[in-house]
Image (spheres, rainbow, N blue to C red):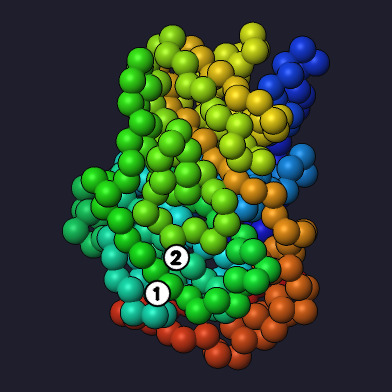
Amino acid sequence: MSWQPAKEADCSVPDDCPAVETVIVPKSRDIGGFAVRRALPSSRRRMIGPFIFLDQMGPASLPKGKGLDVRPHPHIGLSTMTWLVDGEIMHRDSIGSVQAIRPGEVNWMTAGSGIAHSERTPDALRPDGPRLFGVQTWLALPKKHEETAPRFEHHKAEALPRIEGDGVYATLVAGTGWGKRSPVGVFSETVFADVRLSGGATLTVPAEHEERGLYILTGGVDIAGEAFEAGTLLALRPGDPVDVRARGRTHLIALGGETADGPRHIWWNFVSSSAERIEQAKADWKAGRFAKVTGDDEFIPLPEG
């Protein structure tokens, strides 16, 4: 994945929408058989809480015999998570983790001082043409944790807290929210929730986190009398709870957390508070100093430039 910011369609925040600070409508681009919308980083907004990268993948039906093949590549200074709505991906990394991820489950990888991993469609699913739909996120680590030892954790769907009632069905994937706490090991105040709303249902987004965003996967919402459609990232104004009313059946992601402790540099797959540290990571990958990924001998070369 590249660091380049999202390419947005023309959009603006309505003057009479006091709850929404920034609207990002990323354009869809094809990356070899399926569409991706990159919402973060954006020229309008670099981060929401610790979240520095947000891609929507699909929905897509890949050709028979094909699949997702993200060859081994490196990361530093961040945690990654792919949240699947449809499909299955096999994760392998350089600390020995081999773990399939399916809808509703969490694969949470913390790169810290450095890790390499690959993401591929399992062989058994390729003959029929696998489906793929979900979001990929990166969270910048606080400065004091940027060089933490790399680690990986997996959580099954039944381990994640649920928020249900009045047409709202939500899963708290990471962090805290709505009086719940996820078992996922985060390094700063965080919220990431998968929210399904029946038509007309209202989700109240609490004010407990400094920065909050909503990414609409399907359907649409009304906020303070303004309508927003699928494929849109909304950065909410801080300080007050926000009521989000579904315009028909809607699926969205709520994310955010505390403001990052300073700006971050992002280049290719590297995130750091230090430009010099990114240069070192580039040199280490090019020289083959990252550990190898278990069971995957390919790799993505360091991009030029």
Q: Nearer the viewer, residue 171 or 44?
A: 171
- Percent position (x, y) of residue 195? 42, 31
Q: Quadrant of residue 140?
A: bottom right
User: Which residue lies most toward the right here?
Assistant: 15
Q: Amino acid at mark 2?
A: Met
Q: Is residue 292 visible?
A: yes
Query: In this image, 305 relative to 158: left or right?
Result: right
Are discs 1 and 2 less than 8 Å apart at CB? yes
Q: Which residue is mark 1?
A: 93
- Graded by Cα atoms within 10 Å as few (under 14), some (14 to 19) or many (20 or more), the crowding at tag 1 reads many
The residue under the point 60% across, 90% down is 287
Residue 79 got which mark?
none
- From the image, which quarter does the C terminus lie in? bottom right
Residue 262 x %, y %: 77, 59
**Residue 3: quarter of image:** bottom right
Label 1 sits on a secondary structure element that is: strand
Quarter that holds the N terminus: bottom right
